[in-house]
Image: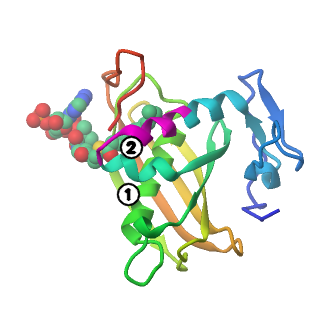
Amino acid sequence: MDKIDSEQPLQSCSNNNKNTVTNGDGINGTNAKCLENKRIHNEDLLDQVKQDFDNLKDIQNFNRIGSMVVPICATQDQLVCEMLVSAEHVNSKGTLHGGQTATLTDIVTARAIGMSVRDRGMASIEISCSYFLPVKLDDTVIITANVLKVGRNVAFAECEFRRKSDGKLAAKGKHTVAILPNAPPVTASGQIIQY
Ligand SMILES: CCCCCCCCCCCC(=O)SCCNC(=O)CCNC(=O)[C@H](O)C(C)(C)COP(=O)(O)OP(=O)(O)OC[C@H]1O[C@@H](n2cnc3c(N)ncnc32)[C@H](O)[C@@H]1OP(=O)(O)O
């Protein structure tokens, strides 16, 4: 099994009764990558965030870029996803485009924050990325987003991009989000429209 970041501290989601202690043998038969972290996986949060990503599959706006992201593990303040790097994600050198990485930073960290902030609108106020190593076409990136702080008006998150092929850190992103006073718009079926 591929290493993600075994140096992450142990965490738990104590406010949910559907927690699963991860043990390296898989969660309900899935190949959840947070297993290496020995974190406490939250099945309800993962279902919720999977739905959030599924909602991107049918949209026409820029956020469709996130539709190939697959959430694989969720705790209260961490979201682990993976994405196969395909032709639409790469630059002329055939490696993951920096703008794509920045967009993934936005989308994945926003959903990590969105696991706990559901009733307020949000707007990105700062994003930054550092690029350490290229990620080649047909490799997979493991994206681990950590929510650092959710305050009354501002939330902070960061994420790591690791190459699945060798586990090396390819990029890091940071995202600061304003939490707006109003509720986010929702569709008739109750789906949150944040973008
Ligand atoms: C699905 C799972 C979860 C998923 C969770 C996903 C959450 C992440 C969502 C990320 C979405 C983005 O990326 S958004 C794209 C990038 N970010 C942006 O475009 C943000 C641009 N910046 C802003 O809108 C503003 O600076 C704010 C809202 C951040 C802070 O505003 P402020 O400090 O109150 O400043 P102020 O000058 O009074 O207002 C400036 C303008 O901000 C807007 N604005 C101000 N307040 C509000 C408000 N409550 N609601 C709406 N819009 C507001 C108005 O357009 C206003 O113009 P007027 O009406 O006065 O003329």
Colour mode of the rendering = rainbow
Ligand 1 resides in the quarter of the picture at top left
- Say which residue appears at 72% left-offset and 62% top-offset: 4
From the image, tell me which residue sits under label 2.
177
Decide which of 7, 28 is in the foreground and name it: 28
Q: Residues within 10 Å of mark 2 (few under 14, many from 20)?
A: many
Point out residue 151 in the picture as x, y percentages from the top left corner. 47, 34
- Say which residue appears at 41% left-offset and 65% top-offset: 88
The vertical placement of 143 against 182, above or below, is below
Secondary structure under the numbered disc 2 in the rendered image:
strand
The range drawn in magenta is: 51-61
Judged from this view, the residue extending furthest toward the top is 188
Amino acid bearing label 1: Ile
Q: Is residue 24 left or right of residue 66?
A: right
Amino acid bearing label 2: Val
Point out residue 178 in the picture as x, y percentages from the top left corner. 35, 39
